[in-house]
Image (cartoon, rainbow, N blue to C red):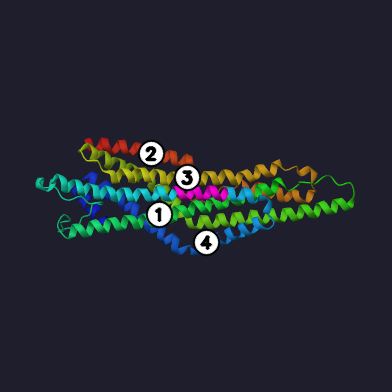
Amino acid sequence: MLISLCHGIHKMEIPHITEAGTYCIVLSYKLLILSCTKINVVHYENLLKSMKEDFKYIFTNGKKYRERFFGLQLVTWKISLFSVIFTFSIPVGMIISAFGSLLYYLLTNESRNGNKRPLLFPFYIHGVDFGDTPIYEIAFTFSNICTLAYAYNYIFMIQTQIVWVRQITSKADIIIWNLQDLLRDIYPPINETQRAYFLNLIKHRMRDIVRQHQSMYSLMEDYSQVYKKLLLFEQKCCGPVVCLTAYCATEKLAEGELNVVLILLCVGTIVMHYIPSHLCTFLTIKVRSICDACWDTPFWNADKAIRPYIVLIMQRSLRPLPLRAAGFEDICIQTFSRKMTSAYSYFNMLRQANRK
């Protein structure tokens, strides 16, 4: 793709440059996914440990929350299943489109008009004709295998991300449930014996809340170490990919060719960028809801000893997510909307420039 991109720049063919450039960006993202997965294996292990701890807690001290907890896990399973099916449908659609284009070429005998057999990607090597046998067959098979391999890596990345964020939000829900029950059956004491009993009971419950809160932030830091680079890369490159794929597909359509591969890539990029943006927005709202749960606690019935802990939990819950870096915007739905608006603007600019 890099060689093809350089060839397009040398010939100043804007449609070729945009198509090859799009695939260069997409394939560089695959390298980033593989490197982040390999380097941050220890953080994946922390995720598994955290999941085991939560299931152990639900079956022991938190068994009264078992039904609600497994309801959240069922929703996570459904979301993961949908993401896997949708993500896998994109490469399958691209491969079906490649075979369909080849079948249409063979049935209509376009070779008589001097047209070359279609390929999934715009390969180019100086002095090599990718329309000749067996080079075409090798390139055709290689491109389809690469598409499936990319889908395999991306499915692992997006599904793990969904499970990770849902696990963090499940911890937040456990904290909220514990805060709601913090002062249950606690009343203003009438003697020192009741006061000591209530104080010990509150301290015991507060200890579990602080542990869960610290565990949630530790898991959030692990998530940030793994996915921060990926999310920031998506933020910078999603707009150009959407713009370039839409432009290439439009130019092909203007020439009388329906490029299903580029259309699928454009739609898939939009949806696959929306999912992390929605997850991070949902995560921010869920973490901040812990502050509201603290405020709803009838703390006036409790001893003054727990008030500093509640204040600290509230202050920490209002901190932004550790997914920020200089020169980047917050990862949220609003940023996604701005990137799509910018991509549409650049799309119109490219079309006008090519017409001139």
Which residue is painted at 44% across and 43% down in the image? 274
Q: What amino acid type is highlighted by mark number 1?
A: Tyr
Q: Which residues are magenta?
A: 72-82
Disc with the residue nearer the chain's start (1 vs 2): 1
Disc with the residue nearer the chain's start (4 vs 3): 4
Q: Would you say the residues marked 2 and 4 are in contact, meaning their CB atoms lie under 8 Å apart?
A: no
Residue 24 locus on image (x, y percent): 31, 53
Disc with the residue nearer the chain's start (2 vs 3): 3
Q: CA distance from mark 2 to mark 3?
A: 16 Å
**Disc 2, SS:** helix
Q: Which mark is residue 342?
A: 2
**Disc 1, SS:** helix
Residue located beneath label 1 in the image = 154
**Disc 4, SS:** helix
Residue located beneath label 3 in the image = 277
Residue 201 locus on image (x, y percent): 78, 53
Residue 148 locus on image (x, y percent): 34, 56
Q: CA distance from mark 4 to mark 3?
A: 21 Å
Q: CA distance from mark 3 to mark 1?
A: 16 Å
Q: What amino acid type is highlighted by mark number 4?
A: His
Q: Would you say the residues marked 1 and 2 are in contact, meaning their CB atoms lie under 8 Å apart?
A: no
Q: What amino acid type is highlighted by mark number 2?
A: Ser
Q: CA distance from mark 1 to mark 4?
A: 18 Å
Which residue is painted at 47% across and 47% down in the image? 276
Residue located beneath label 4 in the image = 43
In front: label 2 or label 3: 3
Q: Would you say the residues marked 4 and 3 are in contact, meaning their CB atoms lie under 8 Å apart?
A: no
Q: Is residue 125 visible?
A: no
In front: label 1 or label 2: 1
Q: Residue furthest right?
A: 191
